[in-house]
Image (cartoon, rainbow, N blue to C red):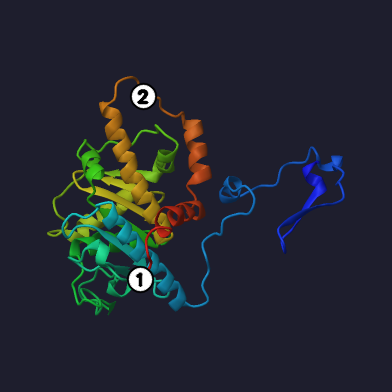
Amino acid sequence: MAPSALVSNPANGSVTKHSIVKKDTTTANAEPKSETPLQAICYGATLPGIPSHPTFAAHRLWALSHMTALFRHWARHNYTEGMSGHISLRDPEYPSLFWMNPLAVHFGLLRASDMVLLSDEPDAASPSYGKILAGNRLQRPANKAGWAIHSAVHRRRGDINAACHAHTRYGKVWAAMGGRRLEMVDQDVCNFYGEALAVYEDYGGVVLGNALGEGEAIAQALGERGKGMVLANHGLLTVGGTVDEAGFLFGLLERSCAVQVELGRAEGAKRIIEDREAEFNFRMASTPVSLSSEERGTVLGVEKTG
């Protein structure tokens, strides 16, 4: 029986015979309806997109819970390196403020209430400069180097609501290889095609002595379209409109560095994806909604939020 002759009854799960629908030949040659990338990958119902929230408080709690889950994911994958590594999250109500993890707390132990609220204000004369404004259940300081980098990124790019930075194993290996860009050797790395991946080559030591200047230089190198960055002799940085997007991109960038390191040890010629296909992959997959959905499947299905 043709599929058009069947209809399902959602009340009892049954499938019964229904009238056969005659094919409408008047629309056979019509242009197909445009789909979003997320709709295009879904067979049947479409995955939900980025949710809206009735209040700022609800939005804040949702985002901080996802941020906490991402830290637990980082702990599970050994992205820890002493006191290094931080995630920032722009506050939905006060856009000049952002949340970040406190210093010297293991990623796997963090709760949403542990995060510290900071200002992106670079002026030392400002009342909010150098202060923790809210949160901080554990009464810990923030990472000053992390604040310098993340505050500059948030000031420069209003579209960025979250940023991730850590000193991961393969990120550090790739960052030590002379500021090289990733090659488009597989479908997934195409999320960093073109201007989506930046390289910061001017390593100036730990971001402390000239913290504000170094932070501004990193933010400038990221550019207006950067989603990820390799910081020479340092580590990786990713950004996004949500913490889900930035988090998925960070894990993907680390794994992509690992693939390319392994390829360097493999025998035989590499096959590089042509620009046309790489750009198509980027356009279809690297949207905020799609990347956020990727993260929900990668992290939030495993890690507990809150």
Image position, residue 51 (x, y; %): 52, 65
Image position, residue 140 (x, y; %): 18, 73
Find disc 1 in the rendering and name its residue.
96
Image position, residue 276 (x, y; %): 51, 32
Determine the secondary structure under disc 1.
loop
Name the residue nearer the viewer: 1 or 72: 1
The numbered dot on residue 154 is none
**Where 125 sits versus 227, above or below?**
below
Q: Residue at x 21, y 76 (%)?
A: 138
Query: Is residue 223 among the parts visible in the rendering?
Result: no
Name the residue nearer the viewer: 47 or 231: 47
Q: Residue at x 24, y 80 (%)?
A: 127
Image quadrant containing the N terminus:
top right
**Where 257 sits versus 287, above or below?**
above
Front disc: 2 or 1: 2
Q: Amino acid at mark 2?
A: Lys
Name the residue nearer the viewer: 207 or 1: 1
CA distance for labels 2 and 1: 45 Å
| Mark positioned earlier in the residue sequence (2 or 1) | 1
Count neighbours of disc 1 (C-alpha within 10 A) and say few if under 14, some if 14 to 19, many if 20 or more: some
Name the residue nearer the viewer: 24 or 116: 24
Give the quarter of the image for residue 198: top left
In the rendered structure, the answer to whether residue 246 lies left or right of residue 109 reads right
Image quadrant containing the C terminus:
bottom left
In the rendered structure, the answer to whether residue 267 lies left or right of residue 32 reads left
Q: Residue at x 27, y 34 (%)?
A: 261
Find disc 2 in the rendering and name its residue.
270
Q: Amino acid at mark 1?
A: Ser
Count neighbours of disc 2 (C-alpha within 10 A) and say few if under 14, some if 14 to 19, many if 20 or more: few
Image position, residue 129 (x, y; %): 23, 74
